[in-house]
Image (cartoon, rainbow, N blue to C red):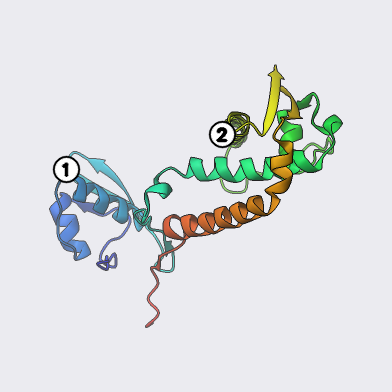
Amino acid sequence: MVRIDTSKLHPGMIVKNYKELCKILGIEPKTSNSKIRQLKEIEELISYQKSGHAFIIKEVYDKKTLKFTLSKPRDKRYKNPRNIYTRYISQILLQVINNCSEKQFSNVTFKDICVLLGLVEIDNNEKYVFKNTDGTTLEMTQEQRTLSIQKMESILKSAITSLVNKGYITCQHTERRYTFSFSASINVINLSEMDVQREKQMLHEEFILFITNNYLRKEAVNDTSN
């Protein structure tokens, strides 16, 4: 990756256009999609405001700021991480249902299932106060929490559907309450416990590889020579 030199920029500075900005940063101007990707890299190092073709520099981030880059997926399966989550949750859910009594999985809520799977902590009816330490509003926090819950519920529903379609379990649900029971293939589940463990291990390795390829820090933008 080409080193981007921000030493000549300062807050309040006005750069007349994109080509001039590239010249100051010591990089070659790009076009079309390459330009879009390049601007995203620049935005990791500086904050600016556009005024026509001009760039008004608002902030130049500290050189010790870590630079995060997203690697291109090396395998087609990593293009849709939802599939990995669904398969992983399916295996955990299958094992939990197999080890629990029917009463534990009768008329349970979505939250009950999440607690049994270890996806969330048990709610002790305590009220948690969100402290505004970084400028994040309570509304923003609640909105993100709602979106996360909706995403988790969607993945959990996909996992349940997968197990039902494979004939491992039966499921009835009304108004966010679920009742599970084992299908006629329960003996198959018991006999394939080692297969379940191997599948879980394989999926765990896929998780690690997926996170490594997509979200881990790839490069630190700090000059170690100083």
Quarter where residue 94 is shown: top right
Residue type at numbered disc 2: Lys
Query: 10 Å neighbourhood of mark 1: few (<14), some, or many (≥20)?
Result: few
Find residue 193 and report its horizontal and vertical position in percent. 70, 50
- Name the image quarter holding the C terminus: bottom left
- Name the image quarter holding the N terminus: bottom left
Q: Is residue 197 above or below residue 181?
A: below
Q: Nearer the viewer, residue 169 or 62?
A: 169
Find residue 138 and report its horizontal and vertical position in percent. 62, 35
Residue type at numbered disc 1: His
Find residue 207 and report its horizontal and vertical position in percent. 53, 54
Residue 35 in view (yes/no): yes
Query: 10 Å neighbourhood of mark 2: few (<14), some, or many (≥20)?
Result: few
Q: Which residue shows up at 79% across the image and 23% down it?
A: 107
Quarter where residue 188 is shown: top right
- How far is mark 2 from mark 1, CA to CA? 39 Å
Q: Which residue corresponds to mark 2?
A: 151
For residue 153, side relative to residue 15 (left or right): right
Q: Which residue corresponds to mark 1?
A: 53
Q: Nearer the viewer, residue 187 or 202?
A: 187
Q: Is residue 110 above or below residue 5?
A: above
For residue 48, side relative to residue 24 (left or right): right
Find residue 97 and report its horizontal and vertical position in percent. 75, 38
Disc 1 is placed on an element classified as loop
For residue 17, side relative to residue 103 (left or right): left
Q: Nearer the viewer, residue 63 or 168?
A: 168
